Amino acid sequence: RVEQRFTLSDEQSIALEGGLIDPESPGYTSGQLDSPVEASRRPGYEARVSYHDRAVGRAHPFVIGIGGYSAEQYYYSSSQIHAWAATADWQVPIFKWFEVTGEAYRGRAIGGLGGGLYKDVVVVSNPITGLPQINGVETVGGWSQFKVRFSPTLEANAAFGLDDALSGNFYGLITTPGINPL
């Protein structure tokens, strides 16, 4: 991972971050020895741009960022899925004791990153040929958290989140017999 910060003023800065990643593929079992990203013979790529504002008097900075992820995944040596994600994140201090944080994302085959209900792909039968077909799970989701700080060592949090594997990806597809459609 690399990061470069650019100072705009004493309180404000912009950060550029980039990195390489080899996420796991949870729920994927095969005779294939390499993980799907390792089988592609190149790592995944991540990038993020963020704005930071440490206004005087605030205990924590205001931060907003956008990011992206891209990787190729190979299954059974012949099926290739392009995994990707677009993200947005925030940290918003409200007065001295309150803060709202969170993240939103949209992507495909991001189970290794925690999206798509921790599933990258689903194996189905092609409705025309009847042959097995591997589809990347498209997902959208996010979470947000409200924090109350009573002291530097005591806080309370309330959070909610959503991870929706989009059902539109599976219209017209026939699942393989014996496969749990979830």
Image: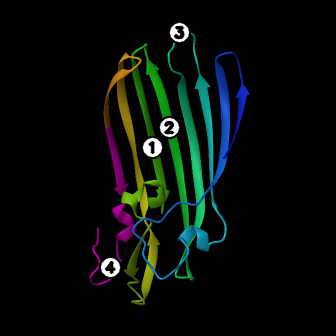
| Mark pair 1, 4: CA separation | 29 Å
| Mark pair 3, 4: CA separation | 57 Å
Q: Tell me which colouring the rendered structure shows.
A: rainbow
Tell me the residue at 42%/90% (across/down). Answer: 129
Q: Earlier in the sequence, mark 3 or mark 4?
A: 3
What kind of element bears circle 2? strand
Q: Earlier in the sequence, mark 3 or mark 1?
A: 3
Tag 4 residue: 175
What kind of element bears circle 3? loop
Does the segment drawn in magenta span residue 171?
A: yes
Q: Quadrant of residue 16?
A: top right
Tag 2 residue: 89
Amino acid carrying label 4: it is Thr
Q: How many marks?
A: 4
Please provide percent x and percent y for residue 142: 40, 44
Q: Earlier in the sequence, mark 4 or mark 2?
A: 2
Q: Is residue 20 above or below residue 73?
A: above
Tag 1 residue: 104
Amino acid carrying label 3: it is Gly
